Image (tube, rainbow, N blue to C red):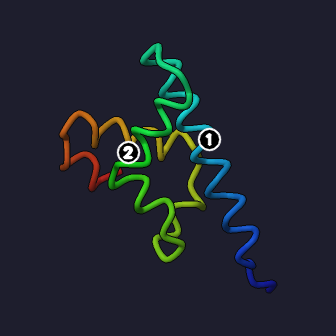
Amino acid sequence: MREVNDNIVEICIESIAAQVADAYADKQGISVTDAMRLFMTTKTYELLTNPKSFLYLEAAPYVEDMLGAELAGDWESWMEV
C-alpha cells in the first residue's frame, strides 16, 4: 500500500476547509472570507489541520456538522460527530 504524502494531506485539508467555509457562508449569508476567518478560530479547524487526527479523510459535510455543533456550544454532539 502506498503511503499518503504530505502534499496530498495538505490538499485534502485545504479542500475540506474551503468547502466548509463556503457552505457556512451560504447558510449564514456572510462572505466566504468571513466564514473562513471564523472557521480558523475553532477547535474543529484545529483538528482538521492536525494530520494526526485524520479528520481530513472525512467528507466536508461531516466537518461542517462538527463546526455547527461547536458554534452552537453543543460539545456533546461535537464529540460524537
Q: Residue at x 57, y 46 (%)?
A: 17
Tell me whether the residue at label 2 lies in contact with that at label 1, contact meaning CB atoms closer than 8 angstroms. no
Q: Nearer the viewer, mark 2 or mark 1?
A: 1
Q: Residue at x 73, y 78 (%)?
A: 4
Residue 7 marker = none
Residue linked to disc 1 = 18
| Number of other residues with Cα within 10 Å of mark 1, as a class: few under 14, some 14 to 19, many 20 or more | some
Report x, y in % for residue 66: 38, 45
Decide which of tag 2 and tag 1 comes sooner along the chain: 1
Decide: is 34 above or below 10.
Answer: above
Side of 6 where 44 appears, left or right: left
Q: Residue at x 54, y 72 (%)?
A: 51
Amino acid beneath label 1? Ala
User: Callout 1: helix, strand or loop?
Assistant: helix
Report x, y in % for residue 27: 46, 18
| Number of other residues with Cα within 10 Å of mark 2, as a class: few under 14, some 14 to 19, many 20 or more | many
Residue linked to disc 2 = 66
- Which one is nearer the viewer's eye here, 3 or 40? 40
Quadrant housing the N terminus: bottom right
- Which one is nearer the viewer's eye here, 21 or 66? 21
Decide: is 56 above or below 63.
Answer: below
